[in-house]
Amino acid sequence: MRVLSLGRWLRAGRVPPRGRVRLNSGHRHSGHRPQAPPQGPAQVPLQVPLQQKVSVEVLDHLEHLALVDFRDSEGVERLQKAIQFADQLHEVNTDGVEPMDSVLEDRCLYLREDDVTEGNCTKELLENARETVEEYFVAPPGNIPLLKLEEQNTYLQGSK
Amino acid sequence: LAPWIPVVGLEIHAQISSNSKLFSGSQVQFAAPPNSLVSFFDASLPGTLPVLNRRCVEAAVMTGLALNCHINKKSLFDRKHYFYADLPAGYQITQQRVPIAVNGSLSYSLCIDNKMSQMVTKTVRIKQIQLEQDSGKSLHDDTRSQTLVDLNRAGVGLMELVMEPDMCCGEEAAAAVRELQLILQTLGSSQAVMAEGQLRVDANVSVHHPGEPYGVRTEVKNINSIRFLAKAIDYEIQRQIQELGNGGTILNETRAFDSKLGCTIPMRDKEGKQDYRFMPEPNLPPLILYDAKSLPANMNHQQVINIDWIHERLPDLPSVKREKLVEQYGILPEHSFTLL
């Protein structure tokens, strides 16, 4: 089972959009006409040099953790560019600012009463499974570990 | 020959006694037809969201108060990622950064000799108590080389109690767990029956020489009764002492206790050190608890949990009941332990 979401996104060539934040976009009364959206990639406001290349060991570790397949040099290059883009965050001075980890932080966490309101849909759930045995889902005997880097025949192995 | 000091710490998972699960409305029940107590959220179908069960929060607060913990008025939920067939979402919702209760203590008693004529009171510190989801159950079918998965247990509320490594042997651990079991049962927050998986105990064991830093610890799992808990810990202590005495080293590994052979064996399925990639649970705002002073005026009281209100309604804990028995009937302290 290989979940290719991150790898595929990277390999499809879609680097996160770089664009200048349009400061006037919310103001209708300022007299400015709304501008047409930029036609090509805009200038990145800050260029942060890549601190260090991502090592093959780290890439291998990522592939094992997230079941991503970097597949070729382009995939790895996309990752480096994405890291470089994200590194711009380090330019912001956050001394003394408490990190925000959720946009929901001011919302109330709704508490549900302890009543039984769901369940009893065994048949429906089992329909999603390719294989079942007497109302159990069937899985392989244990996690099938990805081959160690030395045993693979992949790009990463070749680039070591 | 320098003596060895064994160090034992426990991680305990207690299933919360509630009608429905921690984040969904499916029923909590032991031994039901497979996959019959599973909601779409428990099966991790896309588009489902967690909704926190009030009763589970109250159970955790009660337990924290009974164990002299500081209750965090603001606690947070996180995702702990790992792949396993009985964890359909690929992550467990837990409280890694800021759990609901911290810095408590559990007092328990031990007989100095085997005749119950002298009891000594010991204390183990509770590092924290956190709310988290249980996983489903895997039945391993080795003959057909497959695993059968039942998600009835997936999503059931658990309290994870982390104890500091203040104990030194199997007997202390067993006594501490017995007392914890009684406390949980008195509170009603968990039925804590180990045989039904409502109380699961993992032991962290290491040995070192006095004055030297702590040794490498191993984690011992698959302990199904308090008696086996003591046996497993004592075996592991002896195994480590022997290994180190022979010039060997202890690996930081997870070992399973084999009750038939009375020994611990390395667990195969743990590949190296796990990286759980903790991240804040994006679908749950912080959990805010109140007390008499901070109670908001205009909130629906069904949405408010008041720590002081819960504290006032805590039942007498076993230690208090024992004291009352001794006072009221003039029995010996040792006998109060036989009764409770």
Image (cartoon, rainbow, N blue to C red):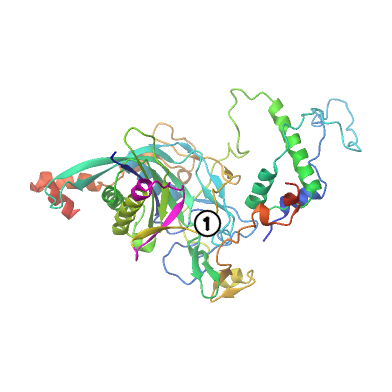
Quarter occupied by residue B338:
bottom left
Q: Is residue B254 magenta?
A: yes
In depth, the one of B154 and A106 nearer the eye is: B154
Mark 1 Cα shell of 10 Å, populated few (<14), some (14-19), many (≥20): many
Compared with B150, B230 (above or below) is: above
In the picture, measured across the screen, residue A117 lies left or right of residue A47, that is left
In the picture, measured across the screen, residue B237 lies left or right of residue B139, that is left
In depth, the one of B27 and B297 nearer the eye is: B27
Residue B157 location in percent, x, y? 45, 54
Q: Is residue B137 visible?
A: yes
Q: Quadrant of the N terminus of chain B?
A: top left
**Given the current orientation, which residue lies at the most extreme bottom position?**
A134
Q: Is residue A67 visible?
A: no
Residue B145 location in percent, x, y? 55, 72
Say which residue appears at 59% left-offset and 68% top-offset.
A125
Quarter occupied by residue B89:
bottom right
The residue that mark 1 highlights is: B24
Q: Is residue B50 magenta?
A: no
Residue B336 location in percent, x, y? 15, 50
Instruction: Write the start and end of the magenta stretch as one range.
Output: B241-261
Chain assignment, label 1: B
In the picture, measured across the screen, residue A46 lies left or right of residue A1, that is right
Q: Amino acid at mark 1?
A: Ser
